[in-house]
Image (spheres, grey):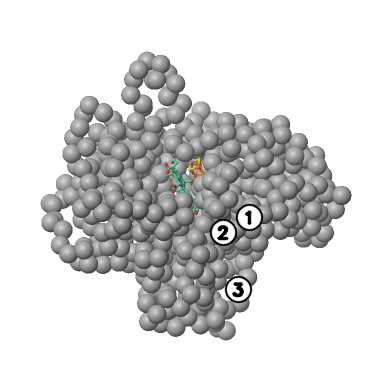
Amino acid sequence: MTDEVSRNERIKEASDYLRGTLADGLREEITGAIVEDDQQLVKFHGMYLQDDRDLRPERTRKKMEKAFAFMIRVRIPGGVLTPQQWLALDQVARDYGNHTMRLTTRQTVQLHGIIKSNLKATLKEIDAALLNSIAACGDVNRNVMCGANPDYGPDHVAALDLARALSNHLLPHTPAYREIWLDGEKIVGGEEEAVEPIYGKTYLPRKFKIVVAVPPSNDVDIFAHDLGYIAIRDDKGDIAGWNVTVGGGMGMTHGEEDTYPRTADVMGFCKTEDAVKIAEAVVTVQRDWGDRVNRKHARLKYTIEDRGLDFFRAEVVRRAGVLLEEAKPFVFTSTGDRYGWSDGADGRSHLTLFVQNGRLADSAVAKQMSTLRQIAQAHESEFRITPNQNLIVANIPPERRTEIHWLAKEAGLLAPVSGLRRNSMACVALPTCGLALAESERYLPDLMRALDERLSAHGLAADDIVIRMTGCPNGCARPYLAEIGLVGKGPGRYNLYLGAAFDGSRLNKLFAESLDHAGIVAALDPIFAAYADRRQKGERFGDFCIRAGFVAACGNGRDFHANTGVKRAS
Ligand code: SRM
Ligand code: SF4
């Protein structure tokens, strides 16, 4: 290894396959934290050390240690949980966490507020429910998503099977998780090849994300991910194979134009039996070619921008030893969830619920966690987390439909009328996210009240418009693929992006910078008015913003920062 590699590369290499000094750090009672290098390693185990940022000023004044606690992110390929698993997560959230469950933009559950001394107990209970948090974070393949819209036809079964196969194949092999958190016996590491045949000692240069989409729904937002598979049907309607996409990603840094979001390219078509081989080849090319010096340039999207898609594809094909055919035609129509009831062929029904920004809690107005617990306790229905922070209660028997409908309604979990709300997402941000520059999850509902009022005034209240907010430019709620994207710039200030495609295929562009609440409403109100007045039949808000000249259409990658001068409509 050269001298130049980033600090994280050295930490990984010295970690003895992700062990570091985590086991000792857990026993250290003098602090609620762990040492810095272990803070990087613990991510590979699905955890982040955080502190409550609301409490920082007071604790600093009182010369107290920060209010440290851990966030645990569970690995749930395809977002599917049995009722027993749902109940187990609900229980640990109440016993050890902050009494909330946070459904994420990658179909998982995050538990916040777990103090160090409770980590092992929490992970043991999660393990007893046949779940874990291995590789939910870190420089490895993360939770694999797949289309969650509630059709449950054979396409969805095939997509879930593929998501699970990819997830299993790319799971780290190190026994460190079992040793440290579950008191497993220490297994002495062998040769690098034997311990981590795919990743090696230093794992990947950066995080890696895979999704599986079932057209016409692009609910997984396939173009935002490192690697994606699009289900392609044959003439009889069976799965013929998968178009493969590579090189999508959202994260960037304000003011650094060599960082940018990028939509994935369609690289070719593969048969189902070759899909995992292709994934392994993509991962190992990225392992070997990805930038290990500059972490801001280490995602696959930069490898592909720098080397070119053709060169990358040729290397993937060579390593996989299988052919990639020319990509097949496909059509996506939306990125959102289909709310409400749908019926399965077996007489059972599925109910897609609206969970505002993914946060489930029991509050004075709505007992959401209790309600879902009550539904799960009947042990009949499956719980499916969507890629849009929502939840599907699936396989509901006919005799429970009415009861579950009313329970969900009372808990405020049925989809709202507002088209903006139905298509909204916000990342966690404050108070737990250490990278947040501005509020997101706690603020978006207030902003939407104001925007809904303006939309109603223009007769647009029920129109589907995708809005997403994040507290910083990392892009956790995929804001650069939203028709209205709001990205935190500083306390109470947001950059406003417009012009993404409703089907998730085109990025948006910067329209205005550093707006406060009043500024956002004032910027959007005339655009809503123009949309109501001048849109063409069926024209989506994002497309209108471009046609009317509010923003230029975004190409890809490096084009994101070009031509962002605010262009007013004539
Ligand atoms: Fe994310 C870092 C939350 C999906 C791009 N993300 C973080 C951290 C862990 C902050 C940190 O590093 O200290 C956030 C924890 C906040 C908290 O308090 O819980 C965080 N990310 C989330 C979640 C919970 C957002 C949500 O509201 O649902 C999502 C959890 C997903 C999961 O279950 O695995 C989440 N993050 C995403 C996505 C969307 C996606 O994957 O579909 C993205 C954009 C796609 C992409 O990866 O390009 C995303 N998160 C980032 C980045 C920027 C990565 C980059 O390439 O620049 C960071 C920062 C980093 O990695 O350095 C980040
Ligand atoms: Fe935190 Fe930024 Fe991700 Fe929001 S987008 S959760 S503020 S890292």
For mark 3, give the secondary structure. loop
Dot 1 corresponds to which residue? 560
Point 80% across, 42% down: residue: 526
Left or right placement of residue 63 versus residue 429 in this view: left
Q: CA distance from mark 3 to mark 2?
A: 20 Å
Mark nearer the N terminus (1 vs 2): 2
Crowding at mark 3 (Cα within 10 Å: few <14, some 14-19, many 20+): few
SS state under label 1: helix
Residue pointed to by mark 3: 330
Residue 241 appears in the rendering: no
Whole-Å distance between the Cαs marked 3 and 1?
25 Å
Q: Amino acid at mark 3?
A: Phe
Query: Is the residue at mark 3 in contact range of ligand 1, meaning its CB lies under 8 Å from it?
Result: no
Amino acid type of disc 1?
Phe
* Label 2: few (<14), some (14–19) or many (≥20) C-alpha neighbours in 10 Å: many
**Closer to us: 376 or 471:** 471
Label 3 with label 1: CB-CB less than 8 Å: no
Q: Residue at x 67, y 32 (%)?
A: 517
Q: Amino acid at mark 2?
A: Arg
In the rendered image, residue 145, in percent from the top left (x then y), is placed at 45, 59
Task: Please say if the residues under marks 1 and 2 sit with CB atoms less than 8 Å apart.
Answer: yes
Q: Nearer the viewer, residue 282 or 47?
A: 282
Q: What distance separates the C-alpha of mark 1 from that of mark 2?
A: 8 Å
Q: Considering only order in the chain, which callout, 2 or 3, is on the residue closer to the N terminus?
A: 2
Mark 1 vs ligand 1: CB below 8 Å: no
Q: Secondary structure at mark 2?
A: loop
Q: Which residue is mark 2?
A: 262
